[in-house]
Image: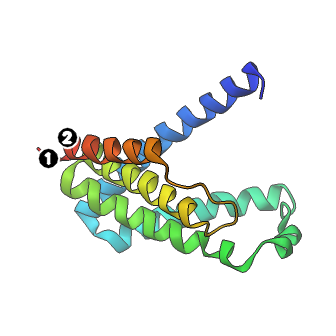
Amino acid sequence: MGVMSLIIVALVGLLGGLAGALQAQSVGVMEAKAGNLAAVFVTYGGGGLVVGLLMLVFHGGRLSDLRQVPWWAFTAGLMGLVIIAALGFMVSNVGLAAGLTLFTSSVLVLGALIEHVGWFGDGRAIDPARLLGIGLVILGTWLVVRG
């Protein structure tokens, strides 16, 4: 990957991170005021509306290519509902930074474990360096959330 490509990936990552933080805060506010189901409904309803309009503009996107996707990949929408519900709950109860820290550290640690057991093909063992990294993530999470 060239330098320019890496810069673009990093910028997209920053944009996604900003959107994620703003979304988590918005869902947390909705959760606190209207409850978890209403917050998830508004989040997915609004997103579904936008994607539906984009699919109309782009004539369905590449829906026919979904036939090549393994069955378990279709659980992504359900997992998204769980993610939004969990973020809304955490942010409304412990705040944005602590909620995002708990969420992010969970993703990192569980991602390493999923790779270790090779659930989705190529595995990557948890070696001592990764184990130290996981320990530091857990320590960092505790330092952010403990207050």
Q: Residues within 10 Å of mark 1 (few under 14, many from 20)?
A: few
The three-letter amino acid code for the residue at tag 1 is: Arg
Q: Quadrant of the N terminus?
A: top right
Instruction: Say how many tags the image has.
Output: 2
Task: Looking at this view, name the residue that lies furthest to the front.
Answer: 128
Q: Secondary structure at mark 1?
A: loop
Task: Give the residue pinned by disc 1.
Answer: 146
The three-letter amino acid code for the residue at tag 2 is: Leu
Task: Looking at this view, name the residue that lies furthest to the left.
Answer: 147
Q: Secondary structure at mark 2?
A: helix
Q: Quadrant of the C terminus?
A: top left
Left or right for 54, reference 77? right
Q: Nearer the viewer, residue 28 or 13?
A: 13
Q: Nearer the viewer, residue 84 or 121?
A: 121
Percent position (x, y) of residue 109?
A: 42, 55
Q: CA distance from mark 1 to mark 2?
A: 6 Å
Residue in the image at 66% along x and 23% along y: 7
Task: Give the residue pinned by disc 2.
Answer: 143
The image quarter containing residue 141 is: top left
Residue in the image at 74% along x and 20% along y: 4
Q: Relative to 58, say whether 75 is above or below.
A: below
Q: Are marks 1 and 2 in contact (CB under 8 Å)?
A: yes
